Amino acid sequence: MTVRRRDLRPLRTLRDHRWFALLTMTRVVGAMLAIALLLAHRVTHHDPYLAAITLVWTPISLAVLRQTQDWRWAPAIWALDALAAFALILAGGDWRSPFYVYALTTLILPATALAWRTAFLWGIAFSGLYGGVALLTEKLPADTLENTIRLETLATHLFVPVVVTTTLAYSSLLLDRLRTARGESERLALQAERQRIAWELHDSAKQRVHAAHLMLSALDTRVADASSRELLDGALAELRGATADMETSVAELRAPLDGRPVDELLRERAAELSRGGVATIDVAGRLPSLPPLVAAHTYRIAAEALTNAVRHAGSSAITVTLASAPEAVTLVIADDGVGMPARPRPGGHGLRSMHGRAETIGAQLDIGPGPGGRGTAVALALPHPGGTP
């Protein structure tokens, strides 16, 4: 049977958490049910050994699958897992085995990882193998086809795996579609909000700042006092900086992420900022796929940190380090500039905005000295998009 997976690698971590939890719960229940039935009435002469094997094998199999995520989604491991369950049925000597429910739990991982048509074929194959096991137990009387009760029982045992596999596969597909639709809805809402803010900045705030700059510029020839001129020049410089910041913000707000990876966008932004030749920017590492809202805020925080390092820190080299671990996703933007000022820059709201964005997505943002106490390091830690496996 050809195994064809859905291309859902960005969702693998989430699937690990969701479906492995279901596997753990049902396998433990199946094991306890089998042991209880073995203890309740005699099935074979070696019932205590079967119960002991089940009691040992269940936690070992779950522990191995939990620690080795690559194995967890390998068809060969699924097949071995099913064969182990069939071996317990054979050892019981009866196709109406206490281990039938236990065997059904081996269908959870293939059913939720394969395309639903392929999962359906996997269920058919499982039923076929189970039918072979029923014959090997020699507990399938020759008159089964003539005995209505036996025939119904056998048909049920053969049909249930197909139903379980198909139902789980279709449920997994619906959940993935629902997540995709929710992500698209978030993306459209963010895009509309960005456009609205961009219009307000361009049509209102930027025009007011420009008007204030023109009025102060008109006073340039009328101010003779040195201290007053110094204040005027400082105010004009701040207005020019504010205008530049707003232009950058408007440009970024009008450039939607469109589902593109955050690391790709950061590399583009780094290339844009490097063109001025003020500082070299190196971006290393990759990030996993992030939900639209988290991706948008993550990119804005990192882009703001890069802009600050280029425009205000006097940096010659900036490094962006991206990393993903099971427990968290991290971004570190470090520069070799002058470091954080003792007092916040007048009119600067960038740091406040960065902290607000981090709080919105449940991330931790730390801003402090860079490596060796030189420059500034901005470190953002995000909860992993799939949770802890």
Image (spheres, rainbow, N blue to C red):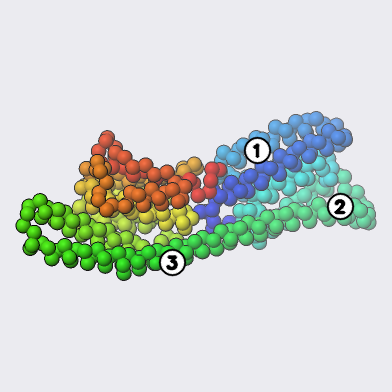
Residue 360 point in image, percent of width and height: 45, 51
Residue located beneath label 2 in the image: 153
Q: Earlier in the sequence, mark 1 or mark 2?
A: 1
- Secondary structure beneath label 3: helix
Q: Residue at x 64, y 51 (%)?
A: 110
* Label tally: 3
* Quadrant (top left/top right/bottom left/bottom right) for the N terminus: bottom right
Q: Residue at x 74, y 45 (%)?
A: 103
Amino acid, disc 3: Ala
* Quadrant (top left/top right/bottom left/bottom right) for the C terminus: top right
Left or right: 109 in relation to 220? right
Residue located beneath label 3 in the image: 192
The residues tagged by marks 3 and 1 sit, at their Cα atoms, a distance apart of 49 Å
Residue located beneath label 1 in the image: 61
Amino acid, disc 2: Thr
Q: Is residue 1 visible?
A: no
The residues tagged by marks 2 and 3 sit, at their Cα atoms, a distance apart of 58 Å
Callout 2: few (<14), some (14-19), or many (20+) C-alpha neighbours within 10 Å? Answer: few
Q: Quadrant of residue 199?
A: bottom left
Residue 263 point in image, percent of width and height: 38, 53
Residue 74 point in image, percent of width and height: 59, 48
Amino acid, disc 1: Ser
Q: Of discs 2 and 3, which sits in the foreground?
A: 3
Contact between marks 2 and 3 (CB within 8 A): the answer is no
Where is 117 relative to 142, above or below?
below
Q: Earlier in the sequence, mark 2 or mark 3?
A: 2
Left or right: 384 in relation to 196? right
